Amino acid sequence: MEGASNDKQRQLDSYRIARDQGHLTTQQGVRVDGTDDAVKVGDRGPTLLSDFHAREKLTHFDHERIPERVVHARGAGAYGRFRPYAGWLGKFTTARFLADPTVETPVFVRFSTVAGSRGSADTVRDIRGFATKFYTAEGNYDLVGNNVPVFFIQDGIKFPDFVHAVKPEPHNEIPQAASAHDTLWDFVSLQPETLHAIMWLMSDRALPRSYRMMQGFGVHTFRLIDADGQATFVKFHWRPKLGAHSLLWEECQQIAGHDPDFHRRDLWDSIAAGQYPEWELGVQLVPEHREFEFEFDLLDATKLIPEEQIPVRPVGSMVLDRNPDNFFAETEQVAFHTANLVPGIDFTDDPLLQLRNFSYLDTQLIRLGGPNFAQLPINRPVAEVRHHQRDGYGQHTIPQGQAAYTENSLGGGCPALADEGTFRHYPEPLYGAPVRARGAKFHEYYRQPRMFWRSMSGPEADHIVAAFAFELGKLTRPVIRERVVEHLARIDADLAVRVAAELGLAVPDALAPAADGIVSPALSQLSLHGTGIATRKIAVLVADGVDADGLR
Ligand code: HEM
């Protein structure tokens, strides 16, 4: 068998069923004499309801489907293990699995696309999910990340709107692809906070060569908590040992036709062949007293911390070395949740993260059929579980005793409350009245997309321009295209000019990109698709003294 045995694999052993031996039975364990012909009156029917085997077989089949994930429906998973290199992170966190090199922690990782349905193709232009469940001795910790370091929106309340724009349109359920449709680009054109992630989406990063060759990012700023209760801000990074590699857009399209399972097959075959993929976990650490030093807000998930400002320091390495036995039981039923935390790690008030912490448990209650899905083999912690929650669909444990509450004197057990090893929320002081608002720095949208664009090599930049041209070229409403190009002009004049030229929009010869990316007066001469809408708006913005960052 692939992979080393560990606590999680030993736990799973008791659930594994070999189907290549023994007799065929009903769910009740009764041996059956045949399963190809239902029992009938004579050999030409009618079929008798008394054939309980036939009815049970059909009934179970009728109920095989569960709802697919509302996002990230298409995915592939594998087991592995994580081990820290050395103890240096122990200065910043009590989480032993991150800091103690003698501790090897079993993991399950699920990679996914975001927008497509369960049966969609792997090589679409999309963000990829990179979700890791660490089965630690202190309980399950989930790092539910993506393969790009920023997200499209800043506040979780906007997530349903964003996903409705990304998913196939409601009237005709077209298109299946994550991009290239009116609703996505309409949303983008009206919500400039999306632009940074959109630049990544238009880049080669959205076309990974393999799940084994993808970076991963926790995206949000989290907290590490040390033994004295002191906090340090942290961003998590996964770096593939094979390096980050991408496909070309033309390759993606051809592969999607030839082999829609390209990424899941690649992961499966590599592990089956003993070519185990590895990643290095790294952290960017920011002391609490430096929280306000940055030109962006650390709580804004549409911004990254440039590595020139805060380097990524290696922490440990993860290897994936075992394929699941059963896709549904393991990869489909795994339930990741940003609120699955262990002592030594905590949230911040990132408004995207705060509502993620609501959403995952909520959706899994329906997707996985009630409140006991943590008892499913793939979700079971290796840490001991003892509580007074009771009953509910799919209860698989047999708690003993008369009373199911703490404290009690009747029998039912009173699990002791521990002094050590407990999770304690970071005691962040709170102040302020309730407002529907965002911090001031959240309103700046263009600097980091510009930084990203200007860090591209020649071929990478060419691919981005081609991607914008392809995606925007498919829109049925020219006004959306114009609004997007207007935003591109705020990111970088050269980018806007190149995309406009590809789209066949009129671009004056004299137009020179401004060195600092600020919308140049020359750009106000840009006539987009003959409507003059963008021309007018840019002129108004410049006249009003709005700079390229959208800040007055
Ligand atoms: C899956 C909600 C933002 C990464 C999901 C699911 C929901 C959801 C409901 C399906 C979960 C399931 O059925 O088990 C949200 C909300 C967000 C948000 C409300 C914003 C407020 C993000 C961000 C990231 C992310 C910022 C990356 C940092 C993922 C991943 C999965 C996922 C990787 C798939 C997990 C798996 O493989 O099972 N999300 N999400 N999401 N989300 Fe989010």
Image: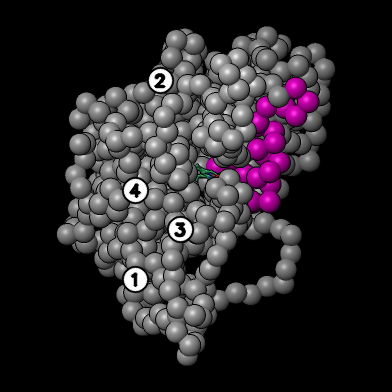
The segment highlighted magenta reads: 151-172
C-alpha gap between disc 2 and disc 4: 30 Å
**Is 522 or 181 nearer to us in this picture?**
181
Expressed as whole percent of the image width and height from the top left, the position of residue 231 reads 41, 69
Ligand 1 has an atom within 8 Å of the beta carbon of the residue at disc 3: no
Q: Which residue is mark 2?
A: 262
C-alpha gap between disc 3 and disc 2: 37 Å
C-alpha gap between disc 3 and disc 1: 36 Å
Residue at figure coordinates x 27%, y 38% from the top left = 322
Residue at figure coordinates x 33%, y 28% from the top left = 267
**Is 358 or 472 nearer to us in this picture?**
358
Q: Which residue is mark 1?
A: 226
Q: Which one is closest to the eye, mark 3 or mark 1? A: 3
Classify mark 1: helix, strand or loop: loop
C-alpha gap between disc 2 and disc 1: 43 Å
Q: Which residue is mark 4?
A: 15
Residue 391 makes an appearance in the image: yes
Expressed as whole percent of the image width and height from the top left, the position of residue 488 reads 63, 28
Classify residue 55 as left or right of residue 285. Answer: right
Q: Which residue is mark 3?
A: 396
Classify residue 340 as left or right of residue 516. Answer: left
Q: Which one is closest to the eye, mark 3 or mark 2? A: 3
